[in-house]
Image (tube, grey):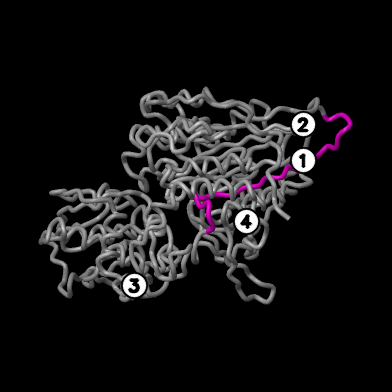
Amino acid sequence: MSATPQPRRPGRRATRVLAAAASLATLGALAAALPASAGQDHADGGTGGKKRTVDVQLLSFNDFHGNLQPPAGSSGQVTEKQHDGTEKKIDAGGVEYLATSLRTARKAHPYSVTAAAGDLIGASPLLSGLFHDEPTIQAMNKLDLDVTSVGNHEFDEGAKELARMQNGGCHPKDGCFEKDKKGKPKKFEGADYPYLAANVTNEKTGKPILKPYWVWKHKGVKVGFIGVTLEGTPDIVSAEGIKGLKFHDEIKTVNKYAKILDKQGVKSIVTLIHEGGSPASQTYNYDCDSPGAGDGISGPITAIAKGITPKVDALVTGHTHAAYVCTIPDPSGKPRMVTSASSYGKLYTDTTLTYDRRTKDIVRTSVKSANHVVSRAQAKAPDMTSLINRWDKLAAPIANRPVGYISADIPGRGAGVPESPLGDLIADAQLAHAKSLDPEADLALMNPGGIRSDLVHKASGSEGDGVVTYGEAFTVQPFSNTVNLVDLTGAQLVTALKQQVSGANEASPKILQVSDGLTYTLDLTKSGADRVVTGSIKLNGKALDPAATYRVALNAFLAGGGDGLPELGKGTKPLVGADDLKAFNDYLAANSSADKPIAPPKADRITIVK
């Protein structure tokens, strides 16, 4: 049995948004261009002769990151808690299976809406990233996605490119990627669902760059959606990507628009927020509320959820790539559902919102929700297979080119520890590239969030086990950051290392991956900056000299003070090298062969005290 695409459901956006926003100053026009509602009522809207309540199915997911094909290695697995208390790893994800899961879930649910909480694009594997994520937007259209919030990665290529994702049009530099039947360039049509960005405004106009909210309607039922990204987006994306934009407080923004929706008679409201938390368990089916309401999750979303007005009935969240279905009390003390569906399309959340036709509100006590695995044991959606094959033909000549060899899996994204073998390898590659530009280069630092996957020994195609292809390397490092060289003093390096675990990073540390020769101790029994043991920091066995100057390699993101590490942005005598992917591929080519593959680094440069 195969899963076939279904007709467009009621509530889908019915109008196209014309291509616009050629410059940042015109982005505010998008808010006016998008429809207030994408749906049309197919009944008289009254309650006469109908049940007082109706169950609205809310299907949601987050942090897809262009993973059209199933993610490799641990990045493509979810952990399931078994009845006997043991845990089981399950292969999951891939848009062919996500489409089947969502279409199957919608059956027998006439009131169904599908929403996402940001980072659908950006940091994508080559199949999507090579084409500026046009393939993923096309896939989301086919999925019948109704609405999504923006995430921080929607800004990776800047606000103008985000406007193109919404409105369509060919890429300003790379042009049109596909051709029509006559062989002429085929224009990219853009998303036929609205991107919501309530808390992102144009600095000059003060207006949201995209629609702040959207209302789903079906047979008299109305549900409003407010979309926001994390206020801290400027700290974790390239400065160029958010130039001219201002990011506002999540709670204040949501409360503002919830009040507006309420005045419009929309009493049922869901917030799509690209910010999240960390559950007490890594199993997707963990009972988050078992210790007591809200006790099973920590992180930024807990305080945000407690501050968002009770007018909001549920929160769909993201950003942390975690899986949870929790209740967190709203400001009035009443439990409210907060969900997240891991990442890469490995899970989807199915939430039942019981809508009261008389009050036009959600019966909060009846809300039910659960995460479900997007199993690869089910049938593939043939329209998604066709989409993948179409783009794969364009990408194959580049994607399948071998760039190096490895002897075993080299964990990176899924390592689950402060220092990963792949992080060490990338830092070494950047130091080697830096030395080719300046022999005086001393060390390299790599941000952990820039590592998007593992390097897997098992062949992904016909290349053979242990062969690293350009496509696989691209999946690991898709950002096209340049490798920069700057001068920093020993004192500045110490400060930067301490900023990993203090200030903005105290609750969620950002542990830099370090090149060979740099060692130090991270004492997790302490708090804040004290977790970095100053006297332990050494370079090639010698204590770091606070007064000495060191030549440091780091990518453009870190060189701009990204990841809450402003001290790294104070470097002097900058020298800009090649992009980080070229540096990585060059290192693999120079240091590995079929006979002598690279072994996973030991990841022993940072000593952890627990």
The mark found on residue 110 in the picture is 1
Residue located at (47% from left, 45% from top): 121
Of tags 4 and 1, the one toward the viewer is: 1
**Counting residues from the N terminus, which is met first, the one under dot 4 or under dot 1?**
1
- Locate residue 440 relative to residue 374 in the image: left or right: left
Q: Residues within 10 Å of mark 3 (few under 14, many from 20)?
A: few
In the rendered image, is residue 229 in sight? no
The kind of secondary structure element at disc 3 is loop
Residue located at (26% from left, 47% from top): 560
- What residue did someone put label 2 on? 219
Of tags 2 and 1, the one toward the viewer is: 1
The kind of secondary structure element at disc 4 is strand
- What residue did someone put label 4 on? 325
The mark found on residue 594 in the picture is 3
Q: Amino acid at mark 2?
A: Lys
Q: Which residues are magenta?
A: 47-70
* Magenta stretch: includes residue 403: no
Measure the alpha-carbon separation of dots 3 and 1: 56 Å
Measure the alpha-carbon separation of dots 4 and 1: 24 Å
- Locate residue 66 relative to residue 368 in the image: left or right: left
Compared with 515, 437 (above or below) is: above
Q: Residues within 10 Å of mark 1 (few under 14, many from 20)?
A: some
